[in-house]
Image (spheres, rainbow, N blue to C red):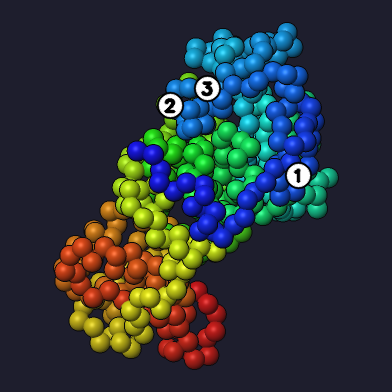
Amino acid sequence: MEPRLDEHRLRGLHQLGSPGRAGQTSALGGVVRAGHRVNSFVGGHRLGVTLAPRPARAGGSYREGTSVASSRPLDPGERLRYARHLTLPGVGEAGQRALRDARVLVVGAGGLGAPVVSYLSAAGVGVIGVVDDDVVERSNLQRQVIHTEAGVGEAKVSSAARFASQLNSGVTIMEHRVRLDARTALEILPEYDVVVDGSDNFSTRYVLNDVCVALRLPLVWASISQFSGQFGVVVPGLGPCYRCVFPRPLADGEVPDCAVGGVLGVLPGVVGTMEAVEVIKLVTGVGEVARDGVWLYDALSTTLTRLPLARDVECVVCGDGDQRLFDGLDGTGRGSDVTEAGQVPQVDAAQLAELDDPLVVDVREHTEVAARPVPAGWGEVVVRPLSTWEPSTAPELLTAAQGRAVVTVCAAGSRSARAARVLLDESREQTGPRIMSLAGGLAAWKEQAEPRARELD
């Protein structure tokens, strides 16, 4: 079924104007610097040759197993450079020409974006756009391998463009030194065939999902943390979108990022390379795209696990109903009904102690729980980090409660309020237990129990 959220509705919900385009061109092999707008161009094809439909939008939407039809055969230099692709079954010359004529946008030039940019450049993707508003820092060099010590302080998009151009002079790199939000996404994304999320933050991922569904663009996304990562592909109309899996965004910072929780330096290289593989499959039509599930990679156990998923007919973006979540969107992918703790019942520590054997759901990360466990005597405690919640988590917790009150707990009250909201939404389908969130989280309890302590969890 076709997605119901079209581009015009998305603009209205985000209170956006028309994106507009500039009509300048770029020669293949150059580096083009852009602000909020992408120059309208097809590198190297302004010679009266009409480009065939893009793979992402053939006939108005992506069709599985299709690829870009090329405008000209490979020249001798290209045949030599990409010889190992030309002998691959399912790729061959047609696939390499499709890569050459493709336009791929990589959002984020950090840990995930680095392997994507490098391998897509090496593969001969004709136009690669890079979006990032940050500069290279020394702490980036542990994992962001396209940047160097000499580039510290330089804009990441410029550093990435230089790396890609030195690797493959036949690739055009578009630099977009902007912070991606709904407005800039609607200005930039229409010029590309496939979008790759290498940002590794919640707000950007949700904006990309929503805009890609509206524009019917395939989105390859990934996320990493410490020793593990996950990735998937959104193909509008042919599988679930990101909101089908994770309906409501967490606020950036609610789950420890690389700066707080750390990350194994090689991990984004592994997961980002998987993103690059999915892009190549989308463009060439070879293989099966990872569009019906989430893939989980654990570096410590060396396991790759697929969680099969289906499109949610009630999804607020690609489902069959109204997109109520979008009312009040602020341009960051969040609705006004998502973040306010006041929308769920609150309980303080004293009130919690008066409850009769409640089920206490600790939604912090396991590392946080190990550092500061929930106090003894609060009731039965189960640990379910909010970052790991799946569609089945809420029903399982309500069943485990067996009619008892459920109290969600986190460090400062924000994550627990979100978890309580999910449980409340689920319990409306049945006669469920009382559901509450610990007001202010363990930090508030700590200040009450230990007046001299002021350190947040």
Q: Residue at x 63, y 37 (%)?
A: 191
**Mark found first going from the N terminus, 3 or 1:** 1
Secondary structure under tag 1 reads strand
Of residues 139 and 133, the one nearer the viewer is 133
Tell me which amino acid carries mark 3: Ser
Residue 424 appears left or right of 202 = left
Is residue 292 positioned above or below 14 on the image? above
Q: Amino acid at mark 2?
A: Glu
Q: What residue is disc 3 on?
A: 67
> Is residue 424 shown to the viewer in this render?
yes
Where is residue 435 drawn, in percent x and y? 27, 74
Q: Position of residue 442 (x, y in %)?
A: 43, 78
How far from the left and from the top, in percent, is residue 217?
52, 38
Given contact means CB atoms under 8 Å apart, are the residues at marks 3 and 1 in contact?
no
Gap in Å between the C-alphas at discs 2 and 3? 9 Å
User: Residue beneath label 1, please?
Assistant: 34
Which amino acid, mark 1? Ala
Q: Secondary structure at mark 3?
A: loop
Q: Nearer the viewer, residue 430 or 454?
A: 430
Q: Residue at x 58, y 54 (%)?
A: 182
* Residue at image location 61% in from the left, 17% down from the top: 70
The circle on residue 64 is: 2
What's the CA distance linking mark 3 and mark 1?
A: 27 Å
Vertical position of residue 65 compared to residue 414: above or below: above
Give the mark nearer the N terminus: 2 vs 1. Answer: 1
182 above or below 34?
A: below
Cα–Cα span, label 2 and label 1: 31 Å
